[in-house]
Amino acid sequence: MPRIRRLHTLLEHIESGRYRLGPHVARHMVQEGFLERDVLAALRWGRELAVYPEDARMLVLGYMLFGGRVKLPLHVVLEYAKPRWVDIVTAFIPERPHRVYSRARLAALLRYDGGKEELEWAGGENPPREAAG
């Protein structure tokens, strides 16, 4: 049976820059409007929801913070099959975040228009064709 890893040990690799954002993450970032820094912050302050040792994967629940007041949940799937390396397989806003937040708070979040950034690709690789267009 593969070794079970914990989030705090994977964070060491992520903080050292030994991670890669997969094309599925990039697609969700563009579609759902979050950034690489949001994914990293969610991991930094998140918690393990599920560990799948047979797949060397983990599901993490973290939060994105907007304007210092509004938090939105973010699920992140990590793969740790390679030694000393973490692949961020996907990240997404859960299907029903309105169960946690009132409609008024979600409306305020959707109107938020601060600090636009360019999408940066981790690992120095070019974006995959399917995410580039």
Image (tube, rainbow, N blue to C red):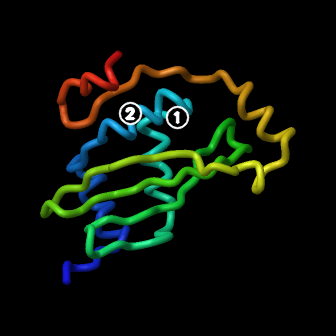
Which-is-in-front pick, marks 1 and 2?
2
The three-letter amino acid code for the residue at tag 2 is Ala
* Corner quadrant of residue 119: top left
Residue count near mark 2 (Cα–Cα under 10 Å), binned few <14, some 14–19, many ≥20: many
Residue sitting nearer the eye, 32 or 67: 32
Identify the residue shown where x is 18% and y is 30%: 124
Residue count near mark 1 (Cα–Cα under 10 Å), binned few <14, some 14–19, many ≥20: some
Estimate the spatial distance between the alpha carbons at disc 1 and disc 2, rounded to whole Å: 9 Å
* Residue 26: image tag: 2
Give the quadrant of the C terminus: top left
Give the number of marks: 2
Residue 75, percent across and down? Answer: 51, 54
Identify the residue shown where x is 47% and y is 49%: 41
Callout 2 secondary element: helix
Q: In the displayed image of the protein, which residue is found farthest to the top?
A: 133
Q: Earlier in the sequence, mark 1 or mark 2?
A: 2
Residue sitting nearer the eye, 27 or 122: 27
Callout 1 secondary element: loop
Residue 120, percent across and down? Answer: 33, 27
Residue 24, percent across and down? Answer: 37, 39
Q: Are marks 1 and 2 in contact (CB under 8 Å)?
A: no
Identify the residue shown where x is 35% and y is 72%: 52
User: Is 91 rendered above or below residue 23?
Assistant: below
Identify the residue shown where x is 25% and y is 22%: 129
Residue position marked by numbered label 1 in the rendering = 34
The three-letter amino acid code for the residue at tag 1 is Phe
